[in-house]
Amino acid sequence: MEGFPILSLMLLVPLVGALLCMFVNASTARWVALIATLIDLVLGIILWASFDIGGAQWQFTERANLFAGFEYKLGIDGIALMLIMLSVFLMPICILASWTSITKRVGEYMAAFLAMELLMIGVFAAQDIMLFYIFFEAGLIPMYLIIGIWGGADRIYASFKFFLYTLLGSVVMLIAMLWMINTAGTGDIPTLLQYDFPPEAQTWLWLAFFASFAVKMPMWPVHTWLPAAHVQAPTAGSVILAGVLLKLGGYGFIRFSLPMFPEASAQFMWLVFGLSMVAVVVTSLIALVQHDMKKLIAYSSVAHMAIVTAGLFAFNSQGIEGAMVMMLSHGLVSGALFLCVGVIYDRLHTREIDRYGGLATNMPRYALFFMLFTMASIGLPGTSGFVAEFISLAGVYQASSTTTFVLTTGIILGAGYMLYLYRRVVFGEQKNADAAAMPDLNAREWLMLAPVAAAVLWMGVYPESFLAPMRTDIAAIEARIARAAPQGDAELVAGKPNAHEANYIAGEHGTGEHGSGEGEHGGSDGTEGEH
Amino acid sequence: MDYATSFGRVIPELVLTGSGLVLLMIAAFGGEKASRLVSILAAVALGLAAALTIPALANGAGGESASAFYGQISADAYSSFAKLLIYLAAIACLMIAPAFFTRLRSMRPEYPVLVVFATLGMSIMVSATDLMTLYVGLELNSLSAYVLASFLRNDSRSAEAGLKYFVLGALASGILLYGISLTYGFTGTTSFAGIRAAQEAGLSTGALFGLIFVLAGLAFKISAVPFHMWTPDVYEGAPTPVTTFFATAPKVAAIALTARVALDAFGSQADAWRQIVIFAALASIVVGALGAIGQNNLKRLLAYSSINNVGFILIGLAAATPAGTSAMLFYLAVYVVMSLGSFAGILMLRNGDGDNLETFDDIAGLSSTRPAIAWCLLILMFSLAGIPPLMGFFAKLEVFRAVVEADLIPLAVIGIAASVIGAFYYIKFVKVMFFDEAVDRVTKSATASQWAILGICTILISPVGWFLSRGLETMTTAAAAGLFAGV
């Protein structure tokens, strides 16, 4: 499908915006960045609308043989589409979140964010493995600057830790990629997805990719860069970090590790499950004792990401679908939680939980939004968090009931630390006068929080909109890894469901005769279900 | 083969010889007033020589058809590519120098003349296919370089650098000569083709010693670990334009020469020298990275950075394949651009009195006082660290691709993991410029030629350079093919 190069255009818009931002004054830079991100959002919506669900696996493909060593090749499937949507949706919100809180070097700040947007879209759209790596790694530069220049007091330590940690994780993956290109004779991702590497080589390749994605994810015990980076980054930086950058690890697993190395993935399933179980329990407990709001949410991110990894390695489409929904949901919810922290941080300039209290009195609208996102983080039915946790845990259950048991305790602990946080910040008496004097949300903050709230509810009530584009791609991955799928311990046996739902009225769908009540029900159809 | 053909093949060298001698006369009679004229003429001569090397590269000359003077010199595509790189780097070094020397009232016409003669020596080095020619070229280059290092006669640091460079360079030359004599003794010839043929059957212990001594002598010239100790001192002490020159042109020449000796003369015994090269490569990467961490002087830091980069270039050599050689040349080209840019950036750091600043303390918060320089240096530093999407990453990618194709996976894994250590001080450079409080010491504006070099280098290594990568790869592939045509 060689049509209008919409993906290249989506890369070009932030690039032009970023270059422009470098040379204009602060207020112009804000508007340039906002307009560029909104154009990308519109393009993203066009992309989603014209995505042919159930059509070709790779759509909007583009290729140009411009460079030595790798090809410029773009194209997306449903999984990439959803993650691109998440990125372009969060970006204008990030720009709004930085509208007043960033006052120094605004042009450079906006340029760094637009560069991030370009790179994230590039990562999800790249169809050449080298191009993927370039976008994947290049994100280090703008993120390093965002944390280092506009971060909090301890920003230098955090920025170094972030940079070196993620770089060390990724470089070995580069060698693995070069080996794959050399062996398979191509760096084309769709071709590599069908290429069977010898199982003994898969083990090494899987480990090399795991080193990179586990750090990006981040998985316990290589998660320690995340709380440091989150706490020091400016609000919008945290949103991007939690909302999109953490998804790179999960995307890597789903795009590379699982379909390219199915045997090795099966071999290491227990490693992933083990780390996920530890992560959920340990980081949830750590989150319980935090005094810093951002740190608490950062640790909760690690716990949620552990459910993603477990879901991915459940080797069934339910687990993978759940993991994908979890990534989207977490992107929205934790992004929104960071925004909520940012809103009060902008007013009081502290993230210390004890400095707040009783905000429900003076900031009722804020309290409402904060509650919605808290509940979504816990996984209350009706919010996206519930859908995500339910589907992924149902998937994991088929593979391992023990793991599911441990992961479920994480949800209880999650409810514990989130409600505890909410109670201390929003309820209780107004012990701090300055906190009690804070004004409620302004129009800009409404603009930031309302769209995210709508998306969270939409995903919670009708997740099918988000699952539909991904379904065939996830089914393809399941088919690909089926040959290596380990035997699950739950040994679920599918029941024999009734052919029709309980309130079925035979005549209604029958031929000719108009249905006339229960009398005709029960015949041959009913008995079939009894067995 | 008649002499006319031979002379026809060394026209670039003849141009440099002739113009070098003429410029020497102008310098002798014109005195200091002539410096500007001599500089311009030298740059023109180098540009002419560069233009004259292009045909051989474009034709992909190699083997017998490129050989001159009975196998003494080979004007093949390989040497042409190296020469092109050397000439362009030398022109850049001539361009950035006047502003620096004029302020110290020591801009003398000898500088361009010495650069021309050093460049001539390098031309001979990269074209040599006989140990004798090799040595002549090497010494012509080295002798000019010793004088250049101590060019600021009244500055004790400069004199010290020249003396150090001379003493240690003489030692290295001795080691190299000893290796050459052993090799000659055990093979009975000094021509590369003859040595290769003689070692076809096997390597005697004596010949192995010859090989080791030759490589040790050359390792000194390319400042590979463990023969790197002189580099930080000389780079720090020498005048910055001269340091720029040392870090670029002679580096290209010495590496191209080393590769030719290894792949041509000792090409039949690749397994014997590969382990030496692998050790030198990994040791250079690690020492170059660790040594730089504690440095406060930017020139010393870049000296360690160049040691570090040489390690990656040697990884390409260790592959001992045409692809590896091509990757090595690709890396060299990118490295030259990155070094030129970084040193040009450092040359532009001057305080109100015009004094050059060269420590970390001076550039704190540079991004808020001089954003243009700071952003260019940021791009250069991330490129040196090998972070995509900059060309430094591209160069590393080419090298590691060649090594993986040659099935040296452990070398690739260790090499790339060690590159993370180096990333630390490159991002520290960025941290000082961007995260620290501004001290605002850099106040003097730079000259147009320095801006031009910095700007061009930054653009070349930015993603814009990707579009040139295809052309560059075509050239390096042709150059590597030219080298292997004679093997």
Image (spheres, rainbow, N blue to C red):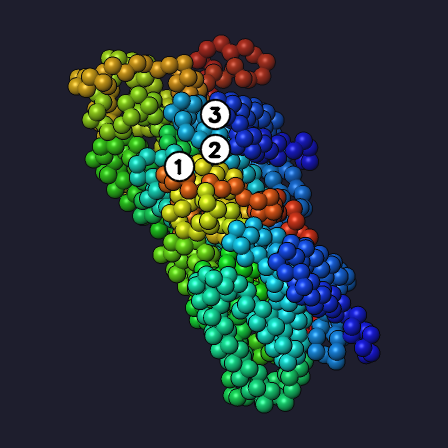
Q: Is residue A356 left or right of residue A176?
A: left
- Local SS, label 1: helix
Q: Chain of mark 1?
A: A
> Could you tell me residue A479's position as x and y percent?
52, 44
Number of marks in picture: 3
Q: Read off the residue under disc 1.
A: A149
Do callouts 1 and 2 mark residues in contact (Cβ within 8 Å)?
A: yes
The residues bearing labels 1 and 3 have C-alpha atoms spaced at a distance of 16 Å
Residue under label 3, please give it. A26
Residue visible at 23% across and 34% down in the picture: A290
Residue depicted at x 62% and y 32%: A9
Chain letter, disc 3 residue: A
Q: Residue A108 shows which numbered tag?
A: 2
Vertical comparison of A201 with A146: above or below: below
Residue occupying the point 66% across, 63% down: B27
In the rendering, at what x and y percent does residue A33 appear? 51, 26
Choose the circle earlier in sequence order: 2 or 3: 3
Q: Residues within 10 Å of mark 3 (few under 14, many from 20)?
A: many
| Label 3: element kind | helix
Q: Find residue B274 and report its horizontal and vertical position in percent.
A: 53, 73
Judged left or right of residue B245, residue A154 is left
Residue placed most toward the observer, B303 or B263:
B303
